Amino acid sequence: MHASGNSRRVAVAPAVRGPAKTFDRDYFERLYERDADPWRYRSSLYEERKHAATIASLAQPRYARALDLGCSIGVLTQRLAAICDDVVAVDTSMRALTAARESCRGNITFKQAHLPGGDWGEGFDLIVLSEILCYLQSPAIAVLARRIRQSALPGAECIAVHGTGYNGCSLSGDAVSELFQRALPGTPLASFRTRHYRLDHWRIVPHQALPAGGGGGLRGETSMVDARPACGLNS
């Protein structure tokens, strides 16, 4: 899954935009039926730079087990597999997963699930969500955050990327990001934004360490700047 189309507007859209659109499994199956690579993962310079920045932002050179939620056709998944011993990649579309299995090799297990549901397993030290959360409504985001915390190892990292332009969804990328971080609190590791997206990276606070009532967002101050990490990419 993905949160924006091929064209990207620079202006930040309102946080809430009206009636919720239904992004069910059939929606994504029809999307991939019309176009095997609807977001041009394999040819878009935007996607190439965004994926490179995502990898460059990670705190560790290698991870034991990563969870890639909304893996689509597996382009970012393949990058994760190069730095992880094991990757579990999840998407709602069977068409997307079929394409991902055909192009990806090695230490990747693909699973079909419509978020926030599905059986992903547990024991993850890295969770990646790249432009997918705006497809969910607030209650589903809360459920997903709870499930991620339950499946994550102590000290696990989460990295989430959200488009900041118009995305055709009821919540903007900024609104989704803030909502998700309140639902899945942690210690900030890196945050930055470009003209087209924002990236947030934090260490998840274990459930037993949360204050009464849970939630609360990221602990400590974060700096959200219009820059990328030191990977030589600008867009």
Image (spheres, rainbow, N blue to C red):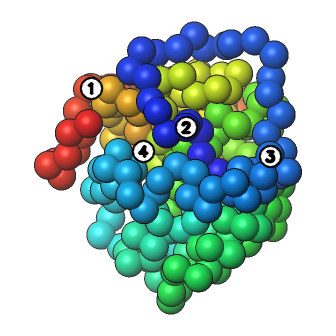
Kind of residue at disc 3: Tyr
Residue placed under numbered mark 4 in the picture: 201
Between the residue at mark 3 and the residue at mark 4, the CA separation in whole angstroms equals 29 Å
Amino acid, disc 1:
Val
**Which-is-in-front pick, marks 2 and 1?**
2
Dot 2 crowding, Cα within 10 Å, few <14, some 14–19, many 20+: few
Which dot, 3 or 1, sits closer to the camera?
Answer: 3
Give percent across and percent down for residue 176: 61, 28
Q: Which residue is mark 2?
A: 5
Compared with residue 123, is residue 36 higher up or lower down, i.e. above or below?
above
Q: Which residue is mark 3?
A: 27
Quadrant position of the C terminus in the picture: top left
**Which residue bears the numbered disc 1?**
225
Dot 1 falls on a residue whose secondary structure is strand
Disc number at residue 51?
A: none
Which residue appears at 47% of the width and 66% of the height?
A: 75
Based on the displayed image, in which of its 4 quarters is residue 221 positioned? top left
Name the front one of labels 2 and 4: 2
Q: Earlier in the sequence, mark 3 or mark 2?
A: 2
